[in-house]
Amino acid sequence: MLDNHAGLDRMDVHMPSPSSDAYHILLVEDDSVDVKTVQRAFRENNITNTLTLAGNGEEALAKLRSGEVSTQRLLVLLDINMPRMNGIEFLKELRADPKLQSLSVVVLTTSNDDRDRIEAYRMNVAGYILKPVTFARFVKAMADLNKYWTLVEFP
């Protein structure tokens, strides 16, 4: 949990965006090792988009609803297994909120449970990616995701 790790307590990591037209990323992840892995994979792939962190679904919703995180040109990377409010619960809240329901969400998780995958797609996620076991594969997955989201036109 982010709340329990020194140096990662509800921090925002802002990587400078290449332009004001670039999308930004909200990473909803409670595991500090996974957060660091995402950050390292972004650096390895020269992904410089603004990256904001939330340690669980409740924190992410609070940041979105307060305007702390802009919903314009936003991609949410969402873990499923988190305390307080897990990824599926977050998606239900997000899709029920008229101001947030159209946000693009990609699930990035260790959950290979078909129920999670089916429920996530029922709530219109843009993708469901299993976290690779090795760092090299994780770097490749982030590179592939970056290629995808640089081709997609955000509203």
Image (cartoon, rainbow, N blue to C red):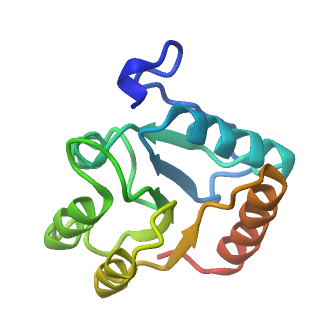
The answer, for residue 73, to whether it is visible in the render is no
The image position of residue 99, as x and y in percent, is 21, 65
**Quadrant assignment, res 96:** bottom left
The image position of residue 119, as x and y in percent, is 29, 80
Q: Quadrant of the N terminus?
A: top left
Picture layout, residue 32 above or below residue 102: above
Q: Is residue 76 left or right of residue 48?
A: left
The image position of residue 58, as x and y in percent, is 22, 44
Q: Is residue 126 left or right of residue 50?
A: left
Residue ID at (28%, 49%): 57
| Closest to the observer, 34 or 114 | 114
Residue ID at (59%, 59%): 23
The image position of residue 127, as x and y in percent, is 51, 78
Residue ID at (22%, 73%): 95
The count of marks equals 0
Q: Is residue 47 left or right of residue 149?
A: right
The answer, for residue 132, to whether it is visible in the render is yes
Picture layout, residue 149 above or below residue 84: below
| Closest to the observer, 116 or 99 | 116
| Closest to the observer, 42 or 135 | 135
**Quadrant assignment, res 91:** bottom left
